[in-house]
Each structure stands twice: as structure tokens, then as C-alpha cells.
Amino acid sequence: MPQYLSAGSHGPLPDVSQHLVAVARGDADPETIVRNGALVNVHTGEIQPEMDLVIADGRIARVTDTGVVSGGEGTEEIDADGQFLAPGFLDTHVHYESSMVTATGFCRGVVPTGTTGAFMDPHEIGNVLGLDGIRLLLDEAADLPLKTFCTIPSCVPAAPGFEDAGAVIDSEDVRDALAWDDVVALGEMMNYPGVVAGDEEVHEKLAATYEAGLEATGHFASRETGASLDAFVAAGITSCHEAVRKEEALARLRKGMWTMLRQGSAWKDVPETIRAVTETNVDTRHLLLVSDDTHPDTITEKGHLDRVLRVAIANGLDPVTAIQAVTLNAAEYYGVDNDLGALSPGKIADVVFLEDLSTVDVGRVMVDGDLVAADGEWLDADTLPDETDHTAAVHDAYPDWARETVAIDPPTSEDFAIPAPDDAATAEVTVIRAHENEVGTTRETATLPVEDGAVVAADGISKAAVVERHGGDGSIGRGFVTGFGFERGAIASTVAHDSHNLLVVGTDDDAMVRAAERVVELDGGMVAVDDDVLASVPLPVAGLMSDRPLSEVSERVSDLEDAWRALGCDLDSPFMTMSLVALAVIPELRLTNRGLLDTVDFEFVDPVQSG
């Protein structure tokens, strides 16, 4: 990528350095002066009251005591009125697709909350549409006020040989994509067993990354903190967001990793993992705070990185240290600190005006030296497509081949049948247990009844199926899942990490058929049914994202959550927990289109053990 970023229409620093210096000398007038703010100085970790930011060419020319610099005739003056001035927040690990909207909708939702830059791993769309789909998402994001950087997916599919995705991104593809200007790193290396075992293809991807002079980001989903973690770090991987315990986060920090503490819609790790810092005296220069997977209703109702910061601060992290974790630390990790991450001379003027530091109450947001949002609302309608034009803009960005990706006929009830042992009245089965707000599952056994030669759902245990939907062999994996509390009905979704096949979970085969039929009709999405369809969220872009505005998608997701509750599920953010039933790289037991998979020993197991 370029050594320096453009500040909106002003161009990169080499294009404007002479004029910026002239403004700093006082020989040219600034375009804007932000007066009388309390500067959050992330370089020194202090608050400097009564400070001015002198801005030209979308960048900061001077940081001075209030009133030192006078503006010219055309200078705009903005009174901060004592508000805290922080650098724009940077999310160092995020999947836009999890917000269920494309880059435009994501930008509309997060920039007013203070997020001005994001380092996305687009492996969701990559698993469906490959590099071509990733390029569509990046091209859409290129001219938005939100600065989007890409970490190129490292594991498409996530578990080769155990599942079938819509695309394959091999080491040569990775090598080619690492040369794109907007790529800054290799995306999360989820195949941690392959790293540790010395898998040749995995290490080819790592080698390509290092030869390109970029970072390799990690996903070490093991709870181990010894030899395997050391091997993972020794391979050159420099960050990880998978710590869920204090001990795991502390081990990563002590081994020199940039340690990303995650607070998404479902994975709420910060209250536990922040203890690695708050209960020790370790240095926080490698501490990062991330959102990872955040649903649309979380963004509209609770915020984005501002929400993550609030949780960290409420759990004992110093507010300035927390802000450093999403500004200077973030920029330094990805090597963009020449331009971003601090409010100091030469940096791009991405500024968050905070009413209160401890509650991270965002008042106004400035991007490239221009105020773009205030009190959660956009100020300039020209910076984004109007919501009435949103769908047309998305369709312009994503051609038909990216919006017609469910390449199967609807499954039948016979497709969902799980045969029982001959003449058995009951069957002992292997069950996936999901846990609220946790990425991990556990393996259990249960005894279920048999009807007409097939095992049926009962006692809080639902049937599950994953149907290959990318135009391959149409294979179906079947199993049982518990932990969701379903009492009746079924759900179906094309959001099923990471291969995003059609996932169907239900209490009876007929309901599962109804749910699957509706998702196929929508060409992707999420559906809840009982006797009829209760709620749906159409997701036509790759079967992952909506072509509707964020506000509308958020309302539909809220309706879907109500429908899940009507079916008996009262989990927090149940969609994300359900979508990971198919994620074949996290322990202990998962379901893919190829079958029920033990993700500790990486071997398929029969869902029915005996009669």
C-alpha cells in the first residue's frame, strides 16, 4: 500500500507537505481551527486542557494552546467548548459482513460513533465469491468517509477437506492479493493446527506475507498457553483475538503478540480478558480492542468501538489507555501511524469530540478535517448515498452474479432424516452443545426417541443440517444441537461460518423444510418459521449482506430475534452463536456439509452411536 494515505480529496502528505509547513509557520492561513478542546494525547498518555488543533489539507498543522494561532478570512473556527478531542477510533479486527450490510451501510452506522478506520478481514464474502467478491467490497468502500483497509483472508475454506465453500484462495492467490494497495496484512490464520504442524500450504501463505513486508494476523483458538502457542508465534504471526481468559491474554502479551480483546455482539470477552492488564503491571503498548463480529442492531442501539471502550473502562481500564488501544496502538500495528492514530502535526485530522471520557459519549466526528457527524447523525448528505437510493447503489456495486449465490433446490424432509439403528426404539446420539456468548462448543451424548426408523428431536435437543449451496455436490451433513432452547419450529440461514452453506436447525423435519424453502426463495438470508414464516432477513449479497439500509436491516433483525424467542430461544445474540455451529476450526464439535466433525482430533463422527 502507499507509504502515506490521502486525506480525502487533499492527497497524501508528499503532495501537501510544503503548504502544511507554511500553515504551521504562520505564512498561510489554516482551513479550520478547532478551539478550546481537552486533547487526549495518546503519545504521552495525558490530557492537555485548553488546546487548539490547526488544520489544513485535511491534516493537523499545529497543536497549540488555545488562542495562539489566528485564522484568516476563510478559516472556519469550531468551538470544542471543553470537549475531549481524541483521534478517530480504529478497529483492528472486524468483518463487515457480520453487520449484514455492505460497506456503505457499515460506514453509515459506525462513523457517527467515532470509528473512522477499520482493518477488515473479508473472509465471509471470500468464502462465497473468492477474490472477486473481496474486490467488490473493497471497491465499494474506497470512496467512503470510513477508511477501509484489508487483511487478505488466509483460510478459504477454513478447514480444507472437512467442508466445501464457494471458493478457494490458495497461496498463489494470497501472494497476488497481498500486492493490492488497500491490503495491509494477512487475515486471521485460523488453521492454527496447520501452522503448528508445519503444513506446507499454510506456511507458503505466511512466507508470501513476510516477503511482501506485511503482518500475519492470527486466530489461535486453543486454550493452551505453552508449546503450541510458542510455535504459533514462532511462525511469525503477530496478533490474536481469540483469548477468552485472563491467562490467555496475558500469555499473548508476554510473548510479544499484539493482543486483541474482543467485544462483539455475541463474543463478550473483554470483562474477563481485560484483567490481564488491570490486575497486573504489564505494558499496554501491544493492547488492542476490537469488535470482530457485530450485528446491525448492536451498532444502531449500542454503538461500535465506543461500546467496546465503555466495556473496557467499566471493567477497570484507564480511559486514556483504552483510547490508545484503538488509536495509536492500532495504527502502529498496521504501519499506518505516519497518518493515523494520534492528534499531532502531520497526522490526518480524524477527530472524535467526546462529551465525557469515561462513558465515551461521542458528540461530533471529524474525518479528513471536515465535520461529518454530530449526535449520532450525518451532517453532510452528500458523503453517502441517501437511504432512498441505498439499494440502487448496492446493486450498482454488486452485479447479479454476486446476488444470486444460492445454487440449490430446496431440501425435502427426507434430506433431513437421520436414520436409527434397525428396530431401535431409542438411539444414543452425539450432540453439539452451544454456549451463550461463547465461541466454543462442547460434545455431549443423549438418548433420543425413534419414529419410523429415524431419530427425532426431543428434550431441548434440535436437529441440524448443513446443505452445500454453492453449486457443488449439494452434500448434506446432519446432526443434533442443544443449548438454544427451541420448543418448536425451525430456523434457516446462509450465514454459517465460514463456508456459509445453508444451515437449518429445527424441532421437526417439516418446519426445517419450510425454513429452508424460504431462504432459497430469498436467495440468501435468515428465516424463522413455525406453522408459517414468523420473520426473515433477506441477505441477497453473497447470501451474507442486505441491499437495504442499516436502519431497516436492524429492525428486521430485531423482529427475527422476537421470532426466535417465540420459538423458545432467549439467548443473547443467538444468530451469531448459531452461525458458528458450522465453524470447523474451533473446538469441540461442529457440523459441516460433509458431516459431524470433531474439531479437536479433526475426524468425522457418526451422530448416531447405538440403539
Image: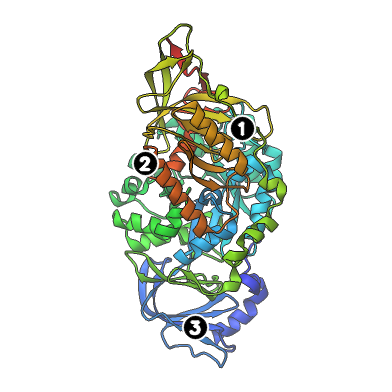
Say which label, 2 or 1, has the lower sequence index. Answer: 1
- The residue type indicated by label 2 comes to Leu
Which residue appears at 46% of the width and 16% of the height?
608
Determine contact: label 2, label 3, CB under 8 Å.
Answer: no
Distance from the alpha carbon under mark 1 to that under mark 3: 60 Å
Q: If the image is split into quadrants, where does the C terminus sit? A: top left
Report the Cα–Cα distance between label 2 and label 1.
Answer: 28 Å
Left or right: 29 in relation to 480: right
Residues marked 2 and 1 touching at CB (< 8 Å): no
Q: Position of residue 70 (x, y in %)?
A: 49, 90
Q: On residue 102, which mark appears?
A: none
- The amino acid at mark 3 is Ile
Disc 3 crowd rating (10 Å Cα; few below 14, some 14-19, many 20+) is: many
The residue depicted at 70 percent of the width and 41 percent of the height is: 173
Residue 410's disc is 1
459 with respect to 472 (left or right): left
Residue lying farthest to the bottom in this orientation: 73
Q: Give the residue at mark 2.
A: 571
Q: Nearer the viewer, residue 541 or 515?
A: 515
Identify which residue, 82 or 217, lies in the foreground.
82
* Residue located beneath label 3 in the image: 33
